[in-house]
Amino acid sequence: MNVEENRVKERVRIIIEDLEQTLLEFIRKHRITHEEYRCASNTLVGSVKAGEESLLYDVFVEAATTDTGNIDNQGSLEAVEGPFYLPNAPWLEAPCVLPQRSGEAGDVLFFHGRVTSPDGTPLAGVELDMWQADADGLYSNIHPNLPEWNLRGRFHSDARGAFEVRTIVPPPYEIPKSGPTGTVLKALGRHLFRPAHLHVKVTHPQYRSLISQVYFDGGEYLENDVANAVREGLIAKLVRQEDPNELAARALTRPYFDVRYDFVLVPQTASST
């Protein structure tokens, strides 16, 4: 076993033993009964059995872990991944359009920006893996009756580090409320809504991978996201475009929306490889 493996093993031991003691102290403090313990453990197991995957944990604690990752971060803010990411989405070629149904509901959105290193050097060939909800707040390959890979796709930045993809403006949406996660939140008197957002994973072999979410300035639930995941540096301005010349250039007959968000990736270091 090498030095790094020993370090990881020791960190795992310290964290698990600390968690164990924290939970035991919590049980004693609140005099948790065996019946209450079983109710809690059944809820945790039931959330997975109900197909919610990590939703329950994501809602309550995932955002705090990204805050840890953002300490002294020299690149773009890290954000929560959530439970609906799937690998191996289709590759898109320019001009990029996220896979969608004919007449996909929702306003047309062009999402664009640049990917650079911290010193502003443009990064070509960066993979952007994007996924989002449809106009009903549903995710393909997760919720039923949606085409596979709808509004999911991967594309690259160009030689200037630039990217652009056409999609639709997603809405705020309510997370599943009929399962264990919804039951817990309703018991706490909390709403179940997330603000409108785009998910993006940004990767390059020589740079640290980034998980991001892009929110829209002025959107609902930015201040009280059920997942407590909104951070100021993740909010971008959603601009309505209705100039006839712009519409003609895009071959569109109705107004569309435009949002720009630039990503900054941090080079890999010896400790992160």
Image: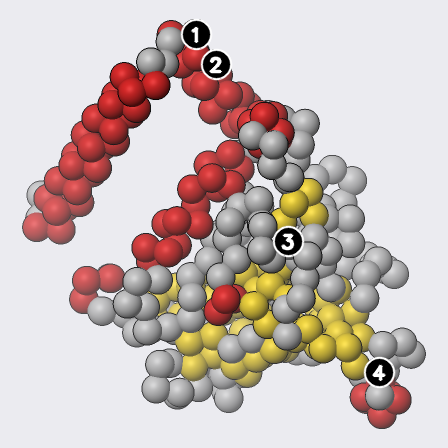
Query: Crowding near pointer 2: few (<14 within 10 Å), some, many (20+)?
Result: few
Q: Position of residue 157 (x, y in %)?
A: 53, 78
Q: Nearer the viewer, residue 187 or 150?
A: 187
Give the camera-side residue of 122 and 169: 169
Instruction: Decide: few, some or many residues near mark 3? Use Cα within 10 Å; few <14, some 14-19, many ≥20.
Output: some
Query: What residue is shown with label 1?
Result: 35
Q: Residues within 10 Å of mark 4 (few under 14, many from 20)?
A: some
Q: Are marks 2 and 4 in contact (CB under 8 Å)?
A: no
Residue under the image location 55 percent in, 54 percent down? 88
Q: How many marks?
A: 4
- The residue located at (84%, 58%) in the rendering is 105
Q: Residue at x 60, y 36 (%)?
A: 190
- Identify the amino acid type marked 4: Glu
Label 2, label 1: how many angstroms apart (C-alpha)? 6 Å
Mark 4 or mark 1: whose residue is earlier in sequence: 1
Asked if the residues shown at circle 2 and circle 1 are in contact, with their CB atoms under 8 angstroms apart, the answer is: yes
| Residue found at the very far right of the displayed protein | 253
User: Which label is found at residue 242?
Assistant: 4
